[in-house]
Amino acid sequence: MKFFIDTANLAQIQEAHDLGILDGVTTNPSLMAKEGIRGEEAIMKHYETICEMVKGDVSAEVIATDFDGIIAEGKKLAALHPRIVVKVPMIKDGVKAIKWFTENKIKTNCTLVFSAGQAILAAKAGATYVSPFIGRIDDGGWDGVELIAQIANIYNIQGFKTEILAASIRSPLHIIKCAEVGADVCTCPLDSILGLLKHPLTDIGLAKFLEDAKKTR
Ligand code: E4P
């Protein structure tokens, strides 16, 4: 399973990259706004900076919701860097646009996916990635990981090539569960990635080893 970081914060991207396990980055308009990025020029520059920092795919989301607007915006984003993936919402014109981008060799991430039916449509249109939002599903009282498992089963049976990018991750446990049920990618906040490091027995064991090591020096 690939690890993407779900942020537009450059320090956090650098920290995950320095850990040596980062395969890509996802952003969305809310994450860009959180970093105070304003205006088209600044937004484009920020995406370029992120692309220069990491080796993997970088998802950049379109704001347009009509076919022509999505295509125009997506073309501009894709021209920024070869590793830009155009993030397109799961709406009717979004599906049409994903098909167009697929035919024109532009990578896409179909976002705001909350059902298996939507995931089938994204795959039929040829999306590179499909992003089910598992945390938001959990927030509503359903089970987001179950949706990942269902999509993985369908894609496997049908031979769809679209990669399942588990999004809206809220905890280290989400990452583990997504790995168990066959997500291709998990896009996570830095805290959830770092949370995977933690175990009290590791800390206790290390303290004891370091204490005993003093006896050997
Ligand atoms: C990533 O592609 C999504 O935009 C993101 O994971 C959504 O996460 P949230 O539900 O925490 O906003």
Image: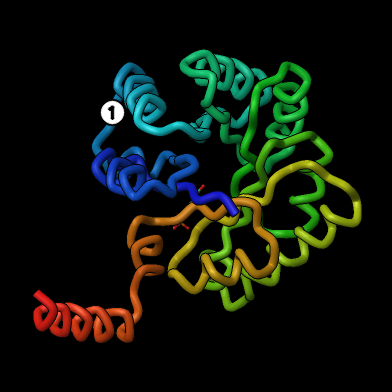
Q: Quadrant of the N terminus?
A: bottom right
Residue 172 percent across, percent down from the top left: 44, 69
Residue 31 percent across, percent down from the top left: 36, 44
Residue placed at 78% from the left, 34% from the top? 126
Q: Secondary structure at mark 1?
A: loop
- Is residue 5 in view? no
Q: Where 45 falls versus 58 (above or below)?
A: above
Q: Is residue 131 left or right of residue 77?
A: right
Residue placed at 32% from the left, 80% from the top? 202
Farthest residue toward the right?
Answer: 158
Q: Amino acid at mark 1?
A: Arg
Residue 156 percent across, percent down from the top left: 84, 55
Q: Where 186 falls versus 77 (above or below)?
A: below
Residue 96 percent across, percent down from the top left: 76, 29
- Is residue 151 in view? yes
Q: Is residue 78 left or right of residue 206?
A: right
| Residue that label 1 marks | 38
Count of picture labels: 1
Q: Quadrant of the C terminus?
A: bottom left
Residue placed at 52% from the left, 15% from the top? 76
Q: Toward which corner of the image does residue 142 lie, by quadrant?
A: bottom right
